[in-house]
Amino acid sequence: MRSAESLSLWLDPPAALAGPLHGDVEADVLVIGAGIAGTAAARHLARSGASVVWLEDSRVGMRATGRNAGFILQGTAERYDRAVGLMGRARARRIHAWSLENHDRIAAVIAQDAISCGYRRGGSLQLAGSAAEEAELVASAALLREDGFEAELLTGDAVPEIHRQAGYTLAVLLARDGELDPVAFVRGAARQAVAAGARLYEDSPVLRLDADAPGDVRAFTPSGTVKAQVAVVCTNARVGQLLPWFQDKVDPVRGQMLATAPLPRVFDHPVYADHGYDYWRQDHLGRVVLGGWRNLDPKAEVGHDEVLHAGIQARMEAFLRRYPPLAEVAITHRWAGIMGFSRDGLPLVGPAPGAPGAVVASGFTGHGFGFAWLAGEALGALVLDGQHPLIEDFGPRRLA
Ligand SMILES: Cc1cc2nc3c(=O)[nH]c(=O)nc-3n(C[C@H](O)[C@H](O)[C@H](O)COP(=O)(O)OP(=O)(O)OC[C@H]3O[C@@H](n4cnc5c(N)ncnc54)[C@H](O)[C@@H]3O)c2cc1C
């Protein structure tokens, strides 16, 4: 276990839900990984009556899912005008709509499973701190509205005073966005998956996956094996370790975060600034959670190690201290996490090229709460029914 300081706010303490796999077991479906995507897949499959074995290297939510900021944002990591430029209007609109459907599914699961996770759907703010970014946000909001999405432009006094004082001049309010405690959410949903019959084993890394033949999949852990008809691989940035085709398709990118002690309300909405490189919010318990600034040292912030970057952490703290109510507040947690960035910035969801016995969900490129829940459910549907429309947009083969 890592030191308390590098544990995220949400993972302190990192409780166990299940023990490791000992011995040899069989199932219809093997799910690998217990972040957002794997939990959604395991829950969907188990609730649909499939026999599911579910293997997690460490604990449910211990990796990216338990280290993120808990923003549920619409769209991809690119702002909408850029997304339209990159992928065309019709596709950008469809993909944006998927992210809103994904949010609706998360909200429905929270209600259905009665998960207490500080969930709130009060909107997010995108902030502009330069003329160039103002123009980008204005263009992005106009395109969103033309395409039927809600995006309210805030100028002048309508920009919250706390942000104006910090030098932000314009904002876009995206009213359908939200926030939550990511670990409370994913562990609540995991408990329901287990209650529905999924056999979860934590501390059970898959060391090798044989998925060359559909209907005959084998996975090997240090103290047991699994035989299944299909593997659902949801291992994020480590997908290439089990499925070599993905080695040059998903890159591990590190993100830095910190959190403060609770304080009276300062920020009403989750905030995205500097083109999404900087983000912060105040959670339901009053703690400010702040992350980003990766663009200060992008070459260093790659790899699989969840290590702190002293320079970025210092810059994050200096930024936080600019807000007068935060000048003295204690910083209680600092941590890092690893995101899986796909080569085209879009998730990879569907049949795994080169492994006919596996399907995969990976490459959420910093927006796992934008797509990964629906992606996990879509893999469940793919396994059970042979299809899901999400896969037409996100099928991995597009990167062949
Ligand atoms: C600092 C930071 C801040 C972020 N903030 C946000 C945010 O606010 N909003 C947002 O939408 N997204 C955010 N993200 C991105 C988001 O966290 C991820 O996109 C999302 O968690 C990915 O979910 P996942 O299920 O694919 O991966 P993970 O949560 O990483 O889950 C994969 C699981 O697979 C397991 N695993 C890997 N290999 C094996 C193996 N061989 N055998 C068994 N198990 C294995 C891992 O242990 C892990 O638990 C952030 C990420 C970081 C790092």
Image (cartoon, rainbow, N blue to C red):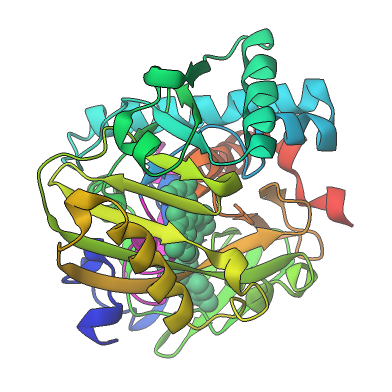
In the rendered structure, the answer to whether residue 251 lies left or right of residue 270 reads: right
Picture mark count = 0
In x, y percent, where is residue 109? 31, 32
In the rendered structure, the answer to whether residue 386 lies left or right of residue 127 reads: right
Nearer to us in this view, 77 or 135:
135
Q: Is residue 190 visible?
A: yes
Nearer to us in this view, 359 or 108:
108
| Quarter residue 395 falls in | top right
Q: Is residue 388 visible?
A: no
Q: Residue at x 57, y 14 (%)?
A: 149
Q: Residue at x 40, y 65 (%)?
A: 316
The stretch drawn in magenta includes residue 64: yes
In x, y percent, where is residue 330? 15, 67
Give the magenta range.
44-69
Q: Residue at x 40, y 52 (%)?
A: 39
In the rendered structure, the answer to whether residue 31 lies left or right of residue 6 reads: right
| Quarter residue 118 falls in | top left
In x, y percent, where is residue 391? 70, 37
Question: Furthest residue to the right?
Answer: 400
Q: Residue at x 28, y 51 (%)?
A: 323
